Image (cartoon, rainbow, N blue to C red):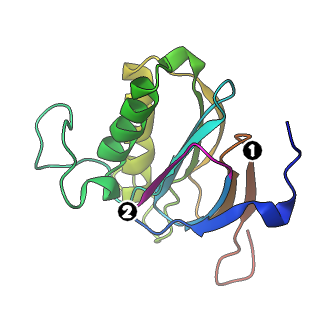
């Protein structure tokens, strides 16, 4: 296989409420506060996917999200289920998917377990448990944002913790 050079890899910025499902190499960059990103990767196919969920659960759908609504990917549950469906559609089973979870900071002064960051983390972990997935890596919670760089063809995630307004982590 030809070795990819950095300049050969397309770069994409993932905005809140978006997902990226890739069969070709791509470098995906996103920045998280209370939002959560889940990366999925299958080594055999080199298929990678990432979401940037802003809210925990879609209230307009009862049960499983079968057909995404116009704002589906802003919800952690809908985005994750859509990504899992894309892997299954290509014959990739849950036990072949490497999962990583990031974000969910409680960036406001309220450190309540009902803060949006905590709810986003809880929703992601609930789906991971329900779907019998394993977590290869996680960096969630606390009070700082994160910048992620996800390489869709290797599953690698590079993380930078962002300092708060006081200049501290």
Q: Residue furthest front?
A: 2
Return the residue nearer the eye: 19 or 168. Answer: 19
Neighbourhood count class around disc 1 (C-alpha, 10 Å): few under 14, some 14–19, many 20 upward? some
Return the residue nearer the eye: 112 or 68. Answer: 68
Q: Which quarter of the figure is the C terminus placed in?
A: bottom right
Q: Position of residue 115 (x, y in %)?
A: 37, 57
Q: Position of residue 99 (x, y in %)?
A: 58, 33
Q: Position of residue 53 (x, y in %)?
A: 40, 55
Q: Is residue 142 visible?
A: yes
Which label's residue is closer to the chain start, 1 or 2? Answer: 2
Residue 16 sits above or below residue 142 on the image: below
Q: Quadrant of residue 160?
A: bottom right
> What stretch of residues is rendered in magenta?
18-25
From the image, tell me which residue sits under label 2. Answer: 17
Q: Could you say which disc has been placed on residue 141 in the image?
A: none
Q: Position of residue 41 (x, y in %)?
A: 61, 35
Return the residue nearer the eye: 89 or 95. Answer: 89
At numbered mark 1, what does the secondary structure look like: helix, strand or loop? loop
135 sits left or right of 127 in the view: right
- Give the residue drawn at x 42%, y 67%: 16
Q: Is residue 137 magenta?
A: no
From the image, tell me which residue sits under label 1. Answer: 156
Q: Is residue 22 magenta?
A: yes
- Give the residue drawn at x 32%, y 42%: 77
169 sits left or right of 70 in the view: right
- Give the residue drawn at x 12%, y 43%: 61
- Give the residue drawn at x 68%, y 50%: 25
């Amino acid at each position: 296989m030809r070795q990819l050079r950095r300049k050969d890899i397309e770069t994409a910025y993932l905005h809140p409420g978006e997902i990226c499902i890739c069969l070709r190499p791509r470098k995906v960059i996103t920045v998280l506060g209370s939002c959560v990103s889940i990366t999925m990767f299958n080594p055999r196919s080199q298929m990678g996917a990432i979401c940037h969920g802003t809210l925990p659960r879609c209230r307009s759908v009862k049960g499983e999200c079968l057909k995404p609504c116009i704002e589906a990917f802003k919800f952690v549950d809908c985005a994750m289920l859509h990504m899992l469906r894309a892997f299954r559609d290509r014959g990739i089973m849950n036990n072949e998917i490497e999962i990583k979870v990031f974000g969910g900071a409680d960036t406001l002064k309220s450190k309540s377990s009902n803060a949006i960051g905590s709810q986003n983390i809880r929703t992601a972990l609930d789906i991971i448990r329900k779907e019998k997935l394993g977590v290869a890596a996680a960096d969630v919670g606390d009070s700082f944002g994160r910048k992620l760089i996800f390489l869709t063809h290797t599953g690698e995630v590079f993380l930078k913790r962002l300092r708060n307004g006081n200049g501290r982590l």
